[in-house]
Image (tube, rainbow, N blue to C red):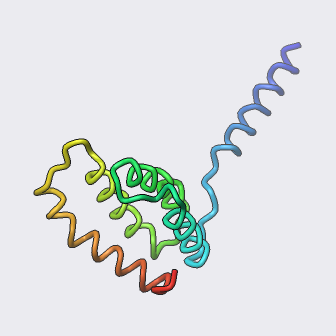
Amino acid sequence: MKKTLTVLIAAGALLGAAGCSAAPQLSNEETCARVKTVVSAQSATSDKAGMTRVANQLRPIKAAASDDLRAPLQTIIEYFDESAKPSPDTAKLEDMKADYTAAGQKYGQVCGSGQ
């Protein structure tokens, strides 16, 4: 009985570890396609709720994003998070605006302006 229990525990630990492995990294094209799907969805509105939805949908994409797009996506998510707060810090948003603009430009360079 102890052997069976030990084997089951070991198998469970292996399966658990396999389930927690990192997602494969996406290519630039795959990252761009996923981001395009999120920002073109009807739920992607410019109001606070829409910005929150977009930021939440971008988080898992950022986790597996290509190296070229991971940092720009993080910057965009942070800007959306601050903008969507009930009382956003306008000074902080102003400070973040240059980085947000640069992130958008980087996204445009990597994904093309038509993406």
Residue 73 spot, x, y in % from top left: 41, 65
Residue located 18% across and 59% down the image: 93
Compared with 2, 77 (above or below) is below
Q: In this view, which residue lies farthest toward the top?
A: 1
In the image, 21 versus 79, the foreground residue is 79
The quadrant in which residue 28 appears is bottom right
The furthest residue to the left: 91
Residue 113, percent from left and from top: 45, 86
Compared across the picture, whether 32 is left or right of 95 comes to right
Residue at 15% across / 64% down in the picture?
95
At x 46% / y 59%, what residue is drawn?
A: 44
Q: Is residue 10 left or right of residue 95?
A: right
Question: Depth check: 33 or 71 in front?
Answer: 33
Task: Choose top left, top right, bottom left or bottom right for residue 26.
Answer: bottom right
Q: Position of residue 38 (x, y in %)?
A: 53, 62
The quadrant the N terminus occupies is top right
Residue placed most toward the observer, 29 or 26 = 29
**Quarter where residue 108 is shown:** bottom left
Q: Residue 19: image x %, image y %? A: 69, 43
- Image side of residue 93 versus residue 23, left or right: left
Identify whether 54 is placed above or below 106: above
Give the number of callouts: 0
